[in-house]
Image (spheres, rainbow, N blue to C red):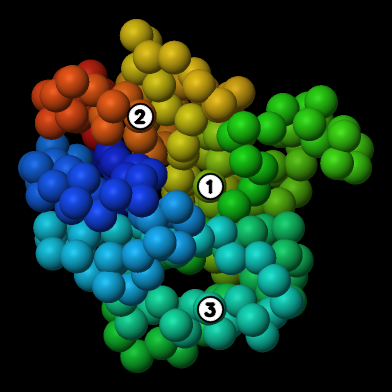
Amino acid sequence: MFDNPIFCALDTTDLEVATALAHDLGGAVGGLKLGLEFFYRHGADGYRAIAQSGLPIFLDLKLHDIPNTVAGGLRAVLPLGPAIVNVHAAGGRAMLEAARRTVDEHDGHKPWLIGVTILTSLDDADLTEVGYSDATESQVERMAALCDDCGLDGVVCSPREIAGQRSSRSLGFRLIVPGIRPTDSAAGDQKRVMTPFDAVDTGADVIVVGRPITQAADPVAAAHAIARSLPEAA
């Protein structure tokens, strides 16, 4: 577990901005999230530059391909030492099991292996349009159960699924939760959102916060304010 559940999403292609934020946010957040925007532009060298901050990193690449390719992708990034990596649960059992084996066989630090369920930008209407027949929460439950059965350490889910997952999964099953918005922040492109306090109070292990921190006039002050708003038990 992390002493501070807040991971700041550095969703930018600007290495100088990301590096400065990473160093400034030490002590204000528990970790950083690097996603596709950043990693596609800067790759392993960019990752290493951010890692110099000393903060744990969630490498959010959402790997989704045939089992052999996903295993190869994980083998390529595991030597970087991320604290959390993720794969798409929609890749199916064989892919998830291949990912689990790959992390287990890695000689170095073993990160949490997390399955992505349903993106927080999607709602029931979106799922119907792409062919899912179940409501969002039911589909998340199915995918989370599959991840659990395949030995993953947890899932990425929206705030609205925290309570359901906490009641149906073991306490050791980690819940990584984006779609976090302080009460005075706009939802943006997220459709299933919750405040930081409510997310942690309901059972999130890690909350991913991006724009409310990175686009604030004072990102460090914004991060500290969010941390102060969390339940004391967190």
Q: Earlier in the sequence, mark 1 or mark 2?
A: 1
Q: Amino acid at mark 2?
A: Arg
Q: Residues within 10 Å of mark 2 (few under 14, many from 20)?
A: some
Q: Residue furthest top?
A: 184
Secondary structure type for disc 1? strand
The residue that mark 3 highlights is 73
Kindly check if marks 3 and 1 are in contact, taking CB atoms under 8 A apart as contact.
no
Secondary structure type for disc 3? helix
Q: Residue at x 24, y 23 (%)?
A: 216
The residue that mark 2 highlights is 211
Residue 175 position in % (x across, y down)? 47, 45
The residue that mark 1 highlights is 156
Q: Amino acid at mark 1?
A: Val
The image quadrant of residue 230 is top left
Residue 180 position in % (x across, y down)? 42, 27
Q: Is residue 122 left or right of residue 217?
A: right
Q: Residue at x 64, y 48 (%)?
A: 117
